[in-house]
């Protein structure tokens, strides 16, 4: 994934990754093609994980007041 070309959307990257997994599992690729597919899949997995991590960081939790009604939001904390 070079910085010169636009990055695929999360959904497009995930579809491409699923297709790579299908090809690798089917055994239809030659050894050289399998290695290239694995490398491409690794880059796509990294891209997808980065997008998921970014999305998680932006999630907000609804804060409930003493009476149980929403009183605002706060950043998501996975801990």
Image (cartoon, rainbow, N blue to C red):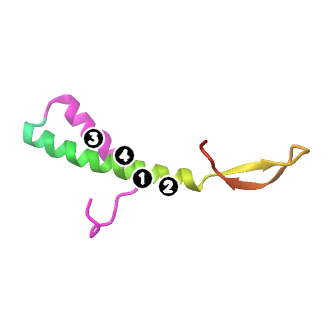
- Can you tell which of label 2 and label 3 is closer to the viewer? 2
The residue that appears at 73% across and 55% down in the rendered structure is: 73
Cβ–Cβ below 8 Å for labels 1 and 2? yes
Q: How far apart are marks 1 and 2 (CA)?
A: 6 Å
Boundaries of the magenta span: 1-28
- Image-based side of 9 in relation to 29, left or right: right
Cβ–Cβ below 8 Å for labels 4 and 3? no
- Can you tell which of label 3 and label 1 is closer to the viewer? 1
Q: Is mark 1 on a helix, strand or loop?
A: helix
Which numbered disc flags the more N-terminal residue, 3 or 1? Answer: 3
Residue 68 location, quadrant? top right
The residue that appears at 39% across and 49% down in the rendered structure is: 48
Q: How far apart are marks 1 and 4 (CA)?
A: 12 Å
- Image-based side of 22 in relation to 66, left or right: left
Q: Mark 4 points at which residue?
A: 14
Q: How far apart are marks 4 and 2 (CA)?
A: 16 Å
Check the image and report above or below for 49 versus 22.
below
Q: Locate residue 28, reporting x and y percent.
A: 13, 33
Q: Name the residue under label 1.
A: 50
Q: How crowded is mark 2: few (under 14 residues within 10 Å), some or many (20 or more)?
A: few
Residue 27 location, quadrant? top left
Q: Name the residue under label 3.
A: 19
């Amino acid at each position: 994934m070079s910085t010169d070309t636009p990055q695929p959307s999360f959904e497009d990257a995930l579809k491409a990754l699923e297709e790579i997994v299908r090809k690798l599992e089917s055994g239809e690729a030659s050894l050289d093609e399998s290695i290239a597919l694995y490398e491409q899949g690794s880059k796509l997995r990294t891209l997808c994980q980065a997008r998921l991590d970014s999305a998680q960081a932006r999630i907000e939790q609804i804060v409930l007041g003493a009476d149980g009604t929403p009183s605002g939001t706060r950043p998501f904390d996975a801990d």
